[in-house]
Image: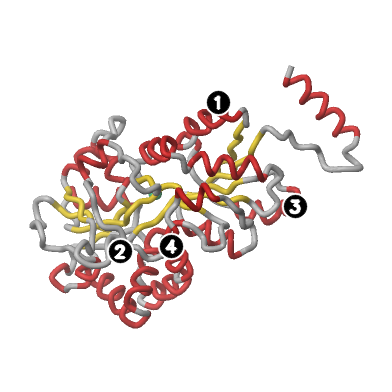
């Protein structure tokens, strides 16, 4: 029944194509996603079951903002879904997202994890933590990001590029808390403590710890879950087993946090459905499931964390600084990484 109705509508709009843009079905929502589809598919299916609204996903690792910009008013996209604050912030700065009004989202998502102008919302969170060799780093030997600058770690730290989006946010948080001059000193000292030139992804640093190349590494928290459960690549289980996880700055400001999140595009053809979907993703059940598939933390307060998270990460103190503030310092952080020639 439904399909016939849709086809008829399509035929109608095709004949009228020269007069008006193709009509969009009301019962769907289109997502441009930097996140891989398997991370959201189960939730989108649940959403469709509950609301009858079909959710379509276009996944790409890059180029989605350019595509949105290029398509302009004709873009079919309703939602931009990202795995980092970076692209959400950039999209809002470039006018590619619109401000929405939702009491549900205001209630479910802490203010620090959403845009003060309601253009983007965090849906899961993760911390950028210190991975430490079980063999070569004693408990309590390092407990703060600031300690990474201590000369005692000379030649003992590994990290990916200083220009990678995850490090830009961390460096941005150092600028926010210490000011640019002090943050620069810290970045330079960290660089001087590196065991090798920045290279590889976050998991490659933990591998390097396992191989004895270095003793400490920076990495996002969920990679531990991805490694310790990796039956397809069991060598990664060994990497994960060789490290302790250190959530930094627990006696002061708390560990640096980042988000995956979403925003409604500026010209969303299905704005109402888009808001409904983001609201659905902030519901208690969706929050638990969404965080669980990637070993992240639900952003919604008092939502149960996955058993694996509870076992290996426990409760920890989060830095309460707003992500908007950190994101606004990312370009300063990039400059700083250049100035100290972090990657050379
Ligand atoms: Fe990642």
Mark sitting earlier along the chain (4/3)? 3
Is 92 on the left-hand or right-hand side of 165?
A: right
Q: CA distance from mark 1 to mark 2?
A: 49 Å
Q: Quadrant of the C terminus?
A: bottom left
Q: Nearer the viewer, residue 190 or 91?
A: 91
Q: Nearer the viewer, residue 286 or 71?
A: 286
Q: CA distance from mark 3 to mark 1?
A: 30 Å
Mark sitting earlier along the chain (4/1)? 1
**118 up-or-down from 274: above or below:** below
Mark 2 residue crowding within 10 angstroms, few (<14) / some (14–19) / many (20+)? some
Q: CA distance from mark 2 to mark 4?
A: 28 Å
Name the residue at 47% across, 43% down: 282
Q: Residue furthest bottom?
A: 181
Name the residue at 31% across, 56% down: 128
Q: Does the beta carbon at disc 1 come under 8 Å from ligand 1?
A: no
Task: Check disc 4 and report its element: helix, strand or loop.
Answer: helix
- Asked whether residue 134 appears in the rendered view, the answer is yes
Nearer to us of marks 4 and 3 is 4
Find residue 289 and report its horizontal and vertical position in percent: 40, 35
Name the residue at 54% across, 50% down: 103
Residues at marks 1 and 2 touching, judged by CB atoms closer than 8 Å: no
Mark sitting earlier along the chain (3/1)? 1
Is 16 on the left-hand or right-hand side of 26?
A: right
Q: Quadrant of the N terminus?
A: top right
Q: Which mark is residue 49?
A: 1
Find residue 227 and report its horizontal and vertical position in percent: 28, 40
Residues at marks 4 and 3 touching, judged by CB atoms closer than 8 Å: no
Task: Check disc 3 and report its element: helix, strand or loop.
Answer: helix
Which colour style is shown?
secondary structure
Q: Which mark is residue 73?
A: 3
Give the residue at mark 2.
197
């Amino acid at each position: 029944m439904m399909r016939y109705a849709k086809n008829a509508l399509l035929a109608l709009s095709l004949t009228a194509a020269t007069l008006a843009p193709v009509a969009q079905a009301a019962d769907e929502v289109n997502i441009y996603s930097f996140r891989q589809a398997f991370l959201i598919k189960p939730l989108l299916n649940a959403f469709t079951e509950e609301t009858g609204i079909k959710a379509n996903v276009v996944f790409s690792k890059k180029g989605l903002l350019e595509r949105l910009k290029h398509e302009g008013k004709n873009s079919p996209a309703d939602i931009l879904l990202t795995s980092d604050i970076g692209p959400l912030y950039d999209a809002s700065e470039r006018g590619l997202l619109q401000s929405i009004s939702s009491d549900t989202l205001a209630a479910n998502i802490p203010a620090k994890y959403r845009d003060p102008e309601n253009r983007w919302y965090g849906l899961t969170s993760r911390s950028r933590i210190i991975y430490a060799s079980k063999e070569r780093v004693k408990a309590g030997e390092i407990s703060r990001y600031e300690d990474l600058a201590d000369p005692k770690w000379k030649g003992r730290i590994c990290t990916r590029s200083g220009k990678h989006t995850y490090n830009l946010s961390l460096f941005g948080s150092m600028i926010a808390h210490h000011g640019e001059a002090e943050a620069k000193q810290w970045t330079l000292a960290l660089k001087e403590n590196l065991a090798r030139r920045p290279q590889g992804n976050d998991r490659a640093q933990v591998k390097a710890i396992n191989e004895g190349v270095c003793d400490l590494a920076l990495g996002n928290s969920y990679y531990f879950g991805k490694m310790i459960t990796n039956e397809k690549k069991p060598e990664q289980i060994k990497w994960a087993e060789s490290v302790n996880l250190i959530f930094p700055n627990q006696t002061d400001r708390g560990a640096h946090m980042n988000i995956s999140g979403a925003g409604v595009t500026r010209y969303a053809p299905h704005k109402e459905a888009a808001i409904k979907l983001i609201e659905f993703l902030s519901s208690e059940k969706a929050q638990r499931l969404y965080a669980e598939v990637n070993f992240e933390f639900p952003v919604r307060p008092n939502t149960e964390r996955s058993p694996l998270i509870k076992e290996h990460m426990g409760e920890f103190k989060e830095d309460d600084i707003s992500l908007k503030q950190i994101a606004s310092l990312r370009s300063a952080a990039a400059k700083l990484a250049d100035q100290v020639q972090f990657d050379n």
